[in-house]
Amino acid sequence: MKQGEKMKTYFIGGLGSNEYHALDFFNELNEPVTFLNPYHSEITSKEDLIAWFSRELHNETEVCLIAHSLGADMARFLAAQCPQVAFLILLDGGYLDLDQLMSLEDELRSTDDYFKTQTFTDIEAVISEEKKGAPYWSKNLERAVRESFKWNERDQKFELALDREKVFNLLRLRRELKASDIRLVATKVLLIVPDFPKDQDWRTQALNQVPASFEMRFIEDCGHDLYTERPNELARMIHQWFEKSVR
């Protein structure tokens, strides 16, 4: 990175996310963030994932990578493979060994069932339900819901704007990445997770396995979708950590 240049920030969301889900969070960060979407790309191997990410980075020499959920699993792997990632921020992801929780076959079956249930004739009703159950809402989140679906002319229904096979490829690849086992030596890492109920022993055990070099912070009264539920608090937490980390 040249003298005086500002480090660029990239973001990988969770499965099914689009840029509109993250816009309020980006606005709170108050700096340019590039949204990366691997879910529409043909990625079937570790080599494919590295090549896709490298193309997105262009010629950047040092970046900050923020990622959520499945995106965080990919990001922890990418940080180990790509020396450009100087700062890594994981949002409730990148620390679970899914093989301990669910078999790949069960996950694929559950995902397939989810695809089948996400068909609607009235997108406005879908938006209304999302808004009703959301702890935080905005025009960007409404647009995010609209962009999450596409119209199927043949069936006369809205369905998920995702390619089932591309999603399955990434779910299979995640098991190969084994993100929770990856050690990062040169990268500064912040893991932010919701303050889940203490009776979730499997999560407590997973967090206890997080490397001591990772800084961990909790957000209270928040669900899995941290950046859509608490964009302001999350951005503030990241700024505080980043300012301390670059000293």
Image (cartoon, rainbow, N blue to C red):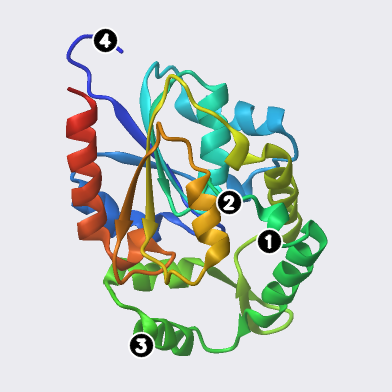
Residue 241 lies in quadrant: top left
**Residue 185 x, y percent position in the rendering:** 47, 21
**Sequence order check, earlier mark of 4 and 3:** 4
User: Image point 30% across, 72% down: which residue?
Assistant: 221
Q: Assess whether mark 3 and mark 2 are in contact (beta carbons under 8 angstroms).
A: no
What secondary structure is marked by label 4? Answer: loop
Question: Disc 2 and disc 4: Cα gap in Å?
Answer: 37 Å
Residue 132 is marked as 3
**Sequence order check, earlier mark of 2 and 3:** 2
Question: Disc 1 and disc 2: Cα gap in Å?
Answer: 9 Å
Q: In the rendered image, which residue does mark 4 sit on?
A: 2
* Discs 2/4, front: 2
- The type of residue carrying mark 4 is Lys
What secondary structure is marked by label 3? Answer: helix
- The type of residue carrying mark 2 is Leu
What secondary structure is marked by label 1? Answer: loop
Residue 101 is marked as 1
- The type of residue carrying mark 3 is Lys
Q: Assess whether mark 2 and mark 1 are in contact (beta carbons under 8 angstroms).
A: yes
Question: Disc 1 and disc 4: Cα gap in Å?
Answer: 45 Å
Question: Disc 4 and disc 3: Cα gap in Å?
Answer: 47 Å
Question: Disc 1 and disc 3: Cα gap in Å?
Answer: 31 Å
Residue 20 lies in quadrant: bottom left
User: Image point 26% across, 54% down: which residue?
Assistant: 234
Q: Is residue 81 above or below residue 152?
A: above
Query: Is 78 displayed left or right of 5 in the figure?
Result: right
